[in-house]
Image (cartoon, helix red, strand yellow):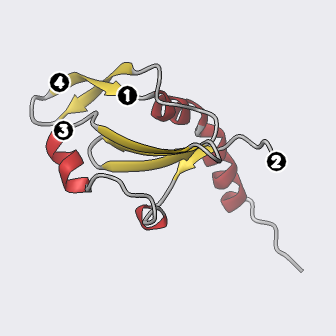
């Protein structure tokens, strides 16, 4: 159908896709990632470590280019540079509209009859 999509996914929804265990990703530290690509459908399933492991899928956006973002480190009490894949930065830049739409629907719910 040629519909581009990008979004987060719950961990229990990607059980069929073998990834590295989350404990291993957390041991490797912030910025570590693991991904699998389905070449037939062109969908990438992706895990990235921030404070916790974040799972996402995309049908049009890839890992490259990797960016360096500044994130707060509570142990060092300062911002540190962490490598961030294109999927995560693209999602963070464009998720505001979805959150705003959800908030407005909740605030101004129309009673159904």
> Is disc 3 surrounded by few (<14), some (14 to 19) or many (20+) residues within 10 Å?
some
- Check contact, mark 1 vs mark 2: CB within 8 A: no
Q: Who comes first in sequence, dot 1 or dot 3? A: 3
- Check contact, mark 3 vs mark 4: CB within 8 A: no
- The tag on residue 29 is 3
Real-space CA distance between mark 2 and mark 3, rounded to the nearest whole angstrom: 38 Å
Percent from the top left, x then y, of residue 100?
Answer: 64, 45
- Comparing 77 with 11, the one in front is 11
- Comparing 7 with 76, the one in front is 7
> Is disc 4 surrounded by few (<14), some (14 to 19) or many (20+) residues within 10 Å?
few
Give the position of the C terminus as an image quadrant. bottom right
Question: Residue at the location (47% across, 23% down)?
Answer: 64
Helix, strand or loop at label 4? It is strand
- The tag on residue 69 is none
Which residue bears the numbered disc 1? 84
Q: Who comes first in sequence, dot 4 or dot 1? A: 4
Real-space CA distance between mark 1 and mark 2, rounded to the nearest whole angstrom: 29 Å
- The tag on residue 1 is 2
Q: Who comes first in sequence, dot 2 or dot 3? A: 2
Q: Is residue 66 above or below residue 4?
A: above
């Amino acid at each position: 159908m040629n519909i581009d999509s990008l979004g987060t996914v719950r961990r229990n929804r990607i059980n069929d896709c073998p990834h590295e265990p989350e404990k291993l990703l957390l041991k490797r530290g912030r910025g570590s990632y693991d991904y699998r690509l389905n070449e037939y459908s062109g969908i990438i399933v992706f895990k990235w470590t921030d404070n916790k492991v974040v799972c996402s899928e995309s049908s049009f956006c890839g890992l490259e280019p990797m960016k360096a973002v500044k994130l707060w480190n509570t142990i060092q009490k300062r911002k540190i540079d962490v490598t961030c894949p294109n999927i995560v930065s693209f999602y963070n830049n464009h998720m505001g509209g979805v959150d705003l739409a959800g908030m407005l629907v909740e605030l101004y719910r129309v009673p159904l009859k």
